[in-house]
């Protein structure tokens, strides 16, 4: 394992489970001090326990990415804990409400956009505020390949929100590269998480389904997503600005 992030401080939102936890663990293994953020304290503490069991450094901070004061406090606490903020991964997101567009509940539609879009914007706003005053940094937003196509029915709010995250990433990248802040996104397809399982479906049944639906014949591994995020956050990707790296086994090729 390399040590690309030794002496770096990394903030990962939505890090209490799944993709966020995998990303946080990967950064810690490469030398970073990692602050994991989310709404629930217990899952975050478990992520920190796993980081420390691997010999890494981590800290848990509860935060609500839809609340400006909470996000500002999260960034300030990150700097207080580890002396700075070099990399941020905005992974916090949710699917609130599923169904045909005409039947979606207005509150659910607004909640999805509030978490996925406004939450990403608020996170970047405060992360960039620190980074540009302290020598720059790198931000990676987690979007989705569904933002580029809407071929999964009944996910109108989620698809809309992730398309917005991709667009926001590109625009923010242009706004702030002059400040020394590189901003990119990763758009994964189905990952090996509970979110990709249909109701009542087993992992074996999901595997069989994906063999028919995805050119690669499988869902993505969380380690593959983490590797993509670490690449975009690293100096190796120094010329990547406003990139949306699609990681979906060929589904949108």
Image (spheres, grey):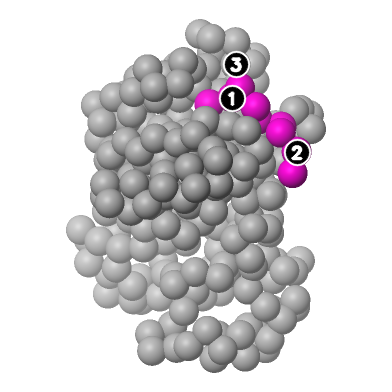
Residue 199 left/right relative to 89: left
Instruction: Work out whether residue 152 or residue 27 is closer to the camera in this orientation and state it.
Output: 27
Give the CA distance from mark 2 to mark 3.
22 Å
Q: Which of the 4 image quadrants contains residue 236?
A: top right
Residue 36 in view here: yes
Q: Few, some or many C-alpha atoms within 10 Å of disc 2 (few <14, some 14-19, many ≥20)?
A: few
Instruction: Work out whether residue 39 or residue 169 is closer to the camera in this orientation and state it.
Output: 39
Taking the spot 62% from the left edge, 42% from the top edge, the residue there is 29
Give the vertical position of 252 relative to 57 (above or below). below
Dots 2, 1 in contact, CB < 8 A:
no
Residue 233 location (% of width, % of height)? 65, 34
| SS state under label 2 | loop
Taking the spot 40% from the left edge, 75% from the top edge, the residue there is 154
Taking the spot 66% from the left edge, 38% from the top edge, the residue there is 30
Q: Earlier in the sequence, mark 2 or mark 1?
A: 2
Which range is magenta?
A: 1-9
From the image, tell me which residue sits under label 3. 136
Residue 225 location (% of width, % of height)? 63, 55
Give the vertical position of 44 relative to 153 (above or below). above
Quadrant into which the N terminus falls? top right
Residue 178 location (% of width, % of height)? 65, 14
Give the CA distance from mark 1 to mark 3.
12 Å
Dots 1, 3 in contact, CB < 8 A:
no
Instruction: Work out whether residue 55 or residue 60 is closer to the camera in this orientation and state it.
Output: 55
Q: Is residue 28 magenta?
A: no
Give the CA distance from mark 2 to mark 1.
14 Å
Residue 25 location (% of width, % of height)? 54, 47
Give the vertical position of 124 relative to 82 (above or below). below
């Amino acid at each position: 394992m390399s040590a690309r992030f030794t002496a770096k401080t990394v903030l990962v939102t939505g890090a209490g489970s799944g993709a966020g936890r995998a990303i946080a663990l990967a950064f810690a293994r490469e030398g970073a001090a990692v602050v994991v953020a989310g709404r629930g304290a217990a899952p975050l503490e478990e992520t920190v326990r796993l980081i420390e069991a691997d010999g890494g450094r981590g800290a848990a901070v509860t935060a609500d990415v839809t609340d400006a004061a909470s996000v500002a406090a999260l960034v300030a606490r990150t700097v207080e804990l580890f002396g700075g903020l070099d990399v941020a991964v905005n992974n916090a997101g949710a699917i609130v409400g599923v169904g045909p567009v005409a039947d979606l509940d207005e509150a659910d539609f607004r909640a999805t956009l509030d978490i996925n879009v406004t939450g990403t914007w608020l996170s970047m706003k405060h992360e960039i505020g620190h980074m540009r005053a302290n020598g720059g940094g790198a931000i990676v937003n987690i979007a989705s390949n569904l933002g580029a196509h809407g071929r999964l029915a009944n996910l109108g709010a989620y698809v809309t929100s992730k398309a917005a995250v991709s667009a926001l990433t590109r625009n923010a990248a242009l706004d702030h590269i002059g400040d020394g802040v590189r901003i990119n996104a990763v758009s994964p397809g189905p990952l090996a998480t509970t979110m990709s399982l249909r109701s009542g479906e087993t992992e074996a049944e999901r595997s069989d389904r994906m063999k028919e639906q995805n050119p690669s014949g499988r869902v993505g591994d969380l380690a593959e997503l983490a590797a993509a995020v670490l690449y975009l956050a690293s100096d190796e990707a120094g010329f990547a600005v406003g990139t949306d790296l699609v990681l979906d086994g060929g589904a949108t090729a």
